[in-house]
């Protein structure tokens, strides 16, 4: 099989290589790899800024077609779950909540300790595979992160809310807005793009696009921009999904602390997802307009041109590498 390999000890070592075909174990699916989505984490791994181990098959946003295995008909489109629990479970992993691992000894396909999905063949335990309805199912992994964010918002909200602000119109932000619209909420999206695909995607979703930051009490933050995060502290309920840079930003923590306490505010972070989140994410995508989802994928890159998929271009929303 062909696979995209990176040597985590050598920045810029990404290469297309030939590897032995995988052999499925008991309970595994054998899957033809069709596509992987590319995100900021993948680019950080290629630059040598993230990841644990040595040689790694990259790719965690997966789409494949079942060749054989239990529980799925051949030809079924599937996505593979990324995280696996700690082999010596912490209290969260022992309860099946491995996305909330407390000791950090989990593994993640294509990120930490386990080969990913950027290969023309891959295997996955059937219990860690989710059926998807179309080729836009390559968006299931980022959608699963969003579904988990909404699940935690539901648990933590101290009051009913009819409106939500999403900051950032990248894949996570747009998918968060999609879920909000599906829930019947008044959804507002803040981003700096003046024109192009991002405002158009927000407006065609039925949400409201802003280039000035609105004052909303409930926020899903999807940029990871430290200066923006600093401005959001003190609002009633803020979910942080973006992984920030190391930029140092001056913040009046005293005022932020005062605002949070006096408003009974909550700020929390969330990342990764469990199997149930993947299943709900697949349902979210099934309910969505497939043309709208396809418009999120602003570039499709063939495997032979793989370096182009890891370039970050101004008009990109989601880049997909076709295997």
Image (cartoon, rainbow, N blue to C red):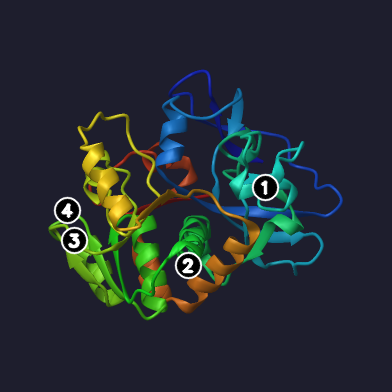
Whether residues under marks 2 and 1 lie with C-beta atoms below 8 angstroms apart, the answer is no
Of residue 251 and residue 94, the one placed in the foreground of this image is: 251
Mark 1 or mark 4, earlier in chain? 1
Left or right position of 207 against 301: left
Q: Is residue 162 above or below residue 138?
A: below
Task: Please tell me which residue lies in front, 28 or 181.
Answer: 181
For label 1, the crowd category at 10 Å Cα-Cα, with few meaning under 14, some 14 to 19 and many 20 or more, is some
Q: Which one is earlier in the sequence, the residue at label 2 or at label 1?
A: 1
Residue for badge 4: 192
Give coordinates of residue 308: x percent, y percent. Answer: 37, 40
Helix, strand or loop for disc 1: helix
Q: Considering the numbered disc 3 on the image, is that residue within a helix, a strand or a loop?
A: loop
Report how far apart the C-alphas of labels 4 and 3 lie in the structure. 11 Å
What residue sits right under mark 1 in the picture?
Answer: 92
Question: Which numbered disc covers residue 196?
Answer: 3
- Vertical order, 297 against 307 (above or below): below
SS label for mark 2:
helix
Mark 1 to mark 3: distance in Å? 43 Å
Q: Are marks 1 and 4 in contact (CB under 8 Å)?
A: no
Which sits earlier in the primary sequence, circle 3 or circle 2? Answer: 2
**Whole-Å distance between the Cαs marked 3 and 2?**
33 Å
Q: Which mark is residue 154?
A: 2
Disc 2 to disc 1, C-alpha distance: 20 Å
Cα distance in 3D space between marks 2 and 4 = 28 Å
Upstream in the sequence, badge 1 or badge 3? Answer: 1
């Amino acid at each position: 099989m062909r696979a995209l390999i990176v040597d985590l000890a050598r920045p810029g070592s990404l290469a297309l290589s030939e590897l032995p075909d995988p052999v499925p174990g008991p309970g595994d699916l054998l899957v033809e790899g069709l596509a992987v989505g590319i995100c900021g984490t993948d680019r950080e791994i290629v630059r040598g800024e993230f990841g644990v181990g040595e040689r790694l098959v990259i790719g965690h946003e997966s789409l494949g077609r079942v060749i054989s295995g239990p529980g799925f008909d051949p030809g079924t489109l599937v996505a593979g779950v990324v995280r696996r629990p700690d082999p010596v479970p912490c209290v969260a992993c022992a309860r099946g909540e491995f996305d909330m691992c407390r000791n950090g000894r989990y593994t993640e396909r294509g990120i930490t300790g386990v080969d990913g999905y950027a290969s023309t063949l891959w295997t996955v335990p059937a219990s860690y595979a989710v059926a998807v309805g179309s080729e836009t199912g390559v968006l299931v992994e980022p959608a699963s992160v969003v579904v988990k964010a909404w699940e935690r918002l539901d648990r933590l909200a101290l009051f009913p809310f009819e409106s939500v602000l999403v900051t950032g119109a990248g894949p996570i932000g747009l998918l968060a807005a999609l879920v909000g619209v599906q829930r019947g909420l008044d959804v507002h999206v803040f981003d700096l793009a003046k024109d192009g695909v991002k405002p158009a995607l927000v407006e065609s979703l039925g949400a409201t696009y802003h280039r000035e930051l609105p004052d909303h009490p409930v926020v899903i933050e999807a940029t990871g921009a430290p200066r923006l995060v600093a401005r959001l502290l003190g609002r009633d309920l803020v979910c942080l999904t973006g992984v920030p840079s190391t930029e140092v930003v001056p913040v009046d923590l005293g005022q932020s602390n005062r605002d949070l306490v006096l408003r009974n505010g909550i700020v929390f972070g969330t990342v990764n997802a469990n199997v149930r989140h993947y299943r709900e994410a697949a349902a979210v995508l099934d309910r969505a307009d497939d043309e709208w989802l396809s418009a999120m994928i602003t570039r499709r890159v063939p495997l032979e041109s793989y370096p182009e998929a890891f370039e970050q271009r101004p008009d990109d929303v989601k880049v997909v590498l076709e295997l």
